[in-house]
């Protein structure tokens, strides 16, 4: 009687998390990262440092005359990374030519058009009959590199982020921050934060902790949110190697 009662109490849904985990690990994950900013800001150095790979082996360096005449391009680099049995298909979307021209009026238009096209393609695939092998090429995150010189955001910075902030998670970065003193970095971050709030730009924020998380995790999350190196503004070069 007791054995029968025990069997009836066991349905089997307790194994669902394990099944989902095994299926996800077997299939792998897709992650598309866009990097934007003018030339010479250390974009390729940061990406290579973050993912411990070299995605720019065949990169061609342009001279000054070629940069002046260059238009904004969209170039994709894809690499498969595996860590502890978990597979990641990483796609880096580079935007050479952005911000390099004398007249940067609407230089962000090709970038917003590309992001919209990926959303539309994913929607069409999801609406189709065969949804088994859908490729998710939507841009999940955009690292935007802000020059360390100057006194805050430039008009092109404001317009770019305002054009993208409803479409993709934006993480502003102060490029080559190791050329500034800690005091200069703090002042620049504070100024950029003020301008982001002033212009109503939505940038990525750390999610709030669940109420049932342990105190140690909550404290760590709080420190990350308030830390100068890991808050809304992040320093490239230095923070990349720190990790």
Image: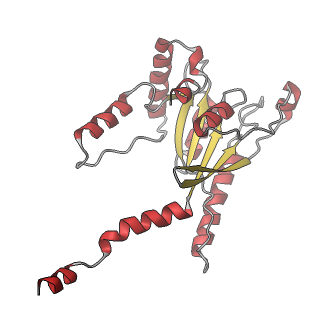
- The answer to whether 166 is drawn above or below residue 176 in the figure is below
| Above or below, comparing residue 99 to residue 115 in the picture | above
Residue at left offset 50%, top offset 14%: 184
- Residue 60: x and y in percent read 83, 35
Which residue is depicted at the point 85% across and 25% down? 64
Q: Position of residue 185 (x, y in %)?
A: 50, 18
Q: Could you tell me which residue is drawn at 64 percent across and 53 percent down? A: 115
Q: Is residue 236 above or below residue 105?
A: above
Image coords of residue 78 (percent x, y): 69, 50
Residue 208 position in % (x across, y down):
33, 44
Which quadrant of the view contains residue 241? Answer: top right
Asked whether 146 or 91 is in front, the reply is 91
Q: Nearer the viewer, residue 185 or 136?
A: 136
Which residue is located at x 65 percent, y 65 percent? 121
Q: Residue furthest left?
A: 1
Quadrant placement of the N terminus: bottom left
243 or 125: nearer the viewer: 243
Q: How many marks?
A: 0
- Establish if 96 lies above or below 178: below
């Amino acid at each position: 009687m007791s054995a029968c009662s025990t069997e009836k109490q066991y349905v089997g849904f307790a194994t669902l998390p394990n099944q989902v985990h095994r299926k996800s690990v077997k299939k792998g994950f897709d992650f598309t990262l866009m990097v934007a900013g003018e030339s010479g800001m250390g974009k390729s150095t940061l990406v290579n440092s973050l993912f411990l790979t070299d995605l720019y082996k065949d990169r061609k360096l342009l001279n000054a005359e070629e940069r002046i005449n260059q238009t904004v391009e969209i170039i994709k680099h894809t690499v498969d990374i595996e860590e502890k049995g978990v597979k990641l298909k990483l796609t880096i979307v580079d935007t050479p030519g952005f911000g390099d021209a004398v007249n940067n009026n609407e230089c962000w238009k090709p970038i917003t058009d590309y992001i919209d096209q990926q959303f539309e393609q994913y929607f069409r695939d999801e609406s189709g009959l065969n949804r088994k092998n859908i490729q998710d090429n939507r841009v999940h995150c955009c690292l935007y590199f802000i020059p360390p010189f100057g006194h805050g955001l430039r008009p092109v910075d404001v317009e770019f982020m305002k054009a993208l902030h409803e479409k993709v998670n934006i993480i502003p970065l102060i490029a080559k921050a190791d050329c500034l003193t800690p005091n200069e970095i703090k002042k620049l971050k504070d100024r950029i934060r003020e301008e982001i709030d002033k212009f109503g730009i939505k940038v990525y924020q750390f999610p709030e902790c669940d109420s049932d998380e342990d105190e140690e995790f909550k404290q760590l999350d709080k420190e990350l949110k308030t830390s100068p190196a890991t808050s809304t503004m992040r320093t490239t070069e230095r923070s990349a190697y720190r990790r």
